[in-house]
Amino acid sequence: MNQNESPADRAFRAEVRGWLEANLSGEFAHARGLGGPGREHEAFEERLAWERHMAAAGWTCVGWPEEHGGRGATVRQQVIFNEEYALADAPARVGHIGENLLGPTIIAFGTDEQRARFLPPIVAVEELWCQGYSEPNAGSDLANVQTRAVLEGDHWTVDGQKVWTSNALESDWCFVVCRTEPGSSRHHGLSYLLVPMKQDGVDIRPIVQLTGTSEFNEVFFDGARTDAGDIVGAPGEGWKIAMATLGFERGVATLGQQVGFRREFEGVLDLARRTGAVDDPLLRDRLTRAYMGLEVMRLNAVRTMAGVASGAPGPESSISKLVWGTWHRELGELAMDVLGAAGMIADGEPYDLSDWQRLFLFSRSDTIYAGSNEIQRNIIAERVLGLPREARG
């Protein structure tokens, strides 16, 4: 792709930058820098209010087609938007999963009725979403899903357990991969259901993490119900739909995620300058490599997005997950090394962590959740490079 900005792109950048400068002030001046990995709990209501303010001005879902409430921004313009959002130190987004995962999936595979029902509340940030994929025995091995759903008249009844469900407590809906064909196994007999979270049949239990916070949750479905029409694709097509969603998560959505990554890197670089750690040649080399990695992620996301524009994302999207998971974990380690011995001391009692300590602890999970590094390497080797399949026991 041509990395030189056109006059239209420069005008778009100026528009985004101007709006952010004008609006991250007054009521929202204190919102700068809020949220991020390990800090999802931080000022949630304020960040929600900010995002609804963005929606009212037409700055959510910028890459969606105009007929679905977006701006129809080009790939390059989506990159520009996320770069400017990071430069402005704007708060971490709360509608990420709906905007970047579920929304594109509904646009690609949903019915007209589903688009009319679910897309406008995502654009307006009136309904928040979470992802119901992982289970106690089906993490990276998603095909081992055991959560069941049965069609009973005009509704589905869902029973089972999901785990590591990010932001489930704040979510209104969950897209759930479940087994709808009795006796089926592995990739067969799965369906992709949209399930409301605010009902008696849903029990959410927060999981206390190393950071002391509870972004992740267990979710138990016990006779949970959703309308018969709240299925994306046909029954049994759940694996295909779920893989497409993962493709959006590892491609287009990576740009939004990199807003926080760039802000964190700049913070680590500033910390190194203030502590003098930047004068250490080994740390300086690692800082340089971290910057290079950030640029590689950006360019790979652009390439992935260009591919998505021509259809559903393919297995190449696993490259993004492998790259950003490893990069972010290494950034947490770099932050600790920049802090030195001071990084081993909590800020206060009983467990008051600094942002850098929280980054380090949280980022240990990045190479595990949403598909471990080992799984991503297998996908890339087998489905992208065409290498022989790994022996299965």
Image (spheres, rainbow, N blue to C red):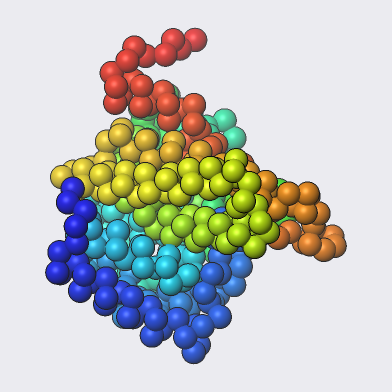
Judge by depth and name the residue closer to the eye, 361 or 99: 361
Q: Residue at x 49, y 31 (%)?
A: 373
In the rendered image, residue 37, in percent from the top left (x then y), is placed at 56, 55
Is residue 160 visible in the rendered structure shown here? no
Residue 347 lies in quadrant:
bottom right
x then y, percent, for residue 75: 22, 56
Between residue 297 and residue 227, name the one nearer to us: 297
Please provide percent x and percent y for residue 236: 31, 34
In the depicted structure, whether residue 323 falls above or below residue 45 = above
Q: Nearer the viewer, residue 233 or 102?
A: 102
Left or right? Give the position of 332 relative to 310.
Answer: right
Give the residue furthest to the bottom: 26
Determine the residue positioned at 43% across, 72% down. Answer: 88
**In the rendered view, does 371 fall on the left or right side of 349?**
left
Which residue is found at the position 36% from the left and 54% from the top? 255
In this rendering, would 256 be left or right of 94? left
The residue at 35%/27% (across/down) is 380
Res. 4 in view: yes
The number of callouts visible is 0
71 sits left or right of 25 in the view = left
Q: Position of residue 137 (x, y in %)?
A: 57, 30
Determine whether 300 is above or below 273 in the image.
above
**Is residue 307 positioned above or below 36 on the image?**
above
